Structures are given as structure tokens and as C-alpha cells.
């Protein structure tokens, strides 16, 4: 259980921050769906949390499929191909 908590902490913060910046940078490409800064922040937070959820889904799916928590460290095309088929 400690390992899963550690992985969640290591993946959540950088994943959230990078996705928040990314979502904020591309927000000008879309129609403005916000009235003030608080609306803007809430939209970006929800989008970033969704992106982090996808990152966790990919990671834990890889752990399950390859039965290895370090599956991403092995640079095999077949492993990534199998994981990409999961939709």
C-alpha cells in the first residue's frame, strides 16, 4: 500500500501541474466559457484532474497487463502496442 501511495504522490503533483499549464496555454484556442478568473481556474482544474486520471489509468493498466510496476521503463514496441489497444 505504501508503494501505491508513493506512486500516486510522485505522479499526481507533476502530472497535475504540467497539465494545468498545458490546459491554460491552449485555453485561448477555444471559445471563452468563463466569466471571471474563478471560472477559468475551475475549468482548468477539472480538465487537469481529468488528464491526471487518464495518466493513472494508463499507468495502472500497464501494471496490470504487464504484471510489473516498472513496465514503462522497458522500451519494447510490443508492450506499448498492446497497451494502446486498450480503449
Image (spheres, rainbow, N blue to C red):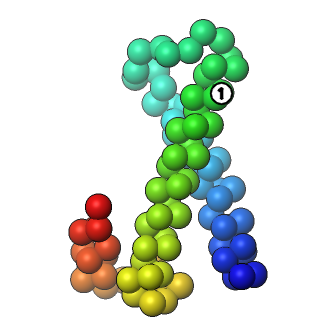
Is 51 located above or below residue 79 in the figure?
above
Query: Foreground residue, 87 or 69?
Result: 87
Q: Residue lying farthest top?
A: 35
Drawn side of residue 4 relative to residue 31, left or right: right
Callout 1: SS: helix
Drawn side of residue 79 relative to residue 25, left or right: left
Query: Foreground residue, 39 or 22?
Result: 39
Q: Residue lying farthest right?
A: 2
- Is residue 74 among the parts visible in the rendering? no
Image quadrant where residue 81 sits: bottom left
Is 20 located above or below residue 31 in the figure?
below
- Is residue 27 among the parts visible in the rendering? yes
Percent x, y of residue 67? 45, 90
The crowding category of the residue bearing disc 1, from other C-alpha atoms within 10 Å (few below 14, some 14 to 19, many at least 20), is some
Residue shown at the point (29%, 61%) measured from the top left: 87
Percent x, y of residue 24? 55, 31
Is 8 located above or below residue 75 in the figure?
above
Q: Which residue is mark 1?
A: 41
Query: Foreground residue, 4 or 26?
Result: 4
Image quadrant where residue 29 sits: top left
Residue shown at the point (48%, 14%) measured from the top left: 32
Residue shown at the point (56%, 15%) measured from the top left: 34
Image quadrant where residue 58 sits: bottom left
The quadrant of the image that shows the N terminus is bottom right
Percent x, y of residue 54? 47, 56
Residue shown at the point (66%, 67%) measured from the top left: 8
Percent x, y of residue 18? 59, 48
Q: How many marks?
A: 1
Amino acid at each position: 500500500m505504501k508503494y501505491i501511495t508513493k506512486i500516486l504522490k510522485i505522479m499526481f503533483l507533476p502530472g497535475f501541474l504540467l497539465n494545468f499549464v498545458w490546459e491554460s496555454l491552449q485555453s485561448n484556442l477555444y471559445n471563452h466559457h468563463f466569466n471571471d478568473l474563478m471560472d477559468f481556474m475551475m475549468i482548468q482544474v477539472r480538465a487537469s484532474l481529468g488528464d491526471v486520471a487518464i495518466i493513472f489509468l494508463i499507468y495502472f493498466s500497464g501494471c496490470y497487463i504487464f504484471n510489473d510496476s516498472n513496465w514503462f521503463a522497458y522500451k519494447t514496441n510490443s508492450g506499448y502496442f498492446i497497451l494502446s489497444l486498450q480503449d
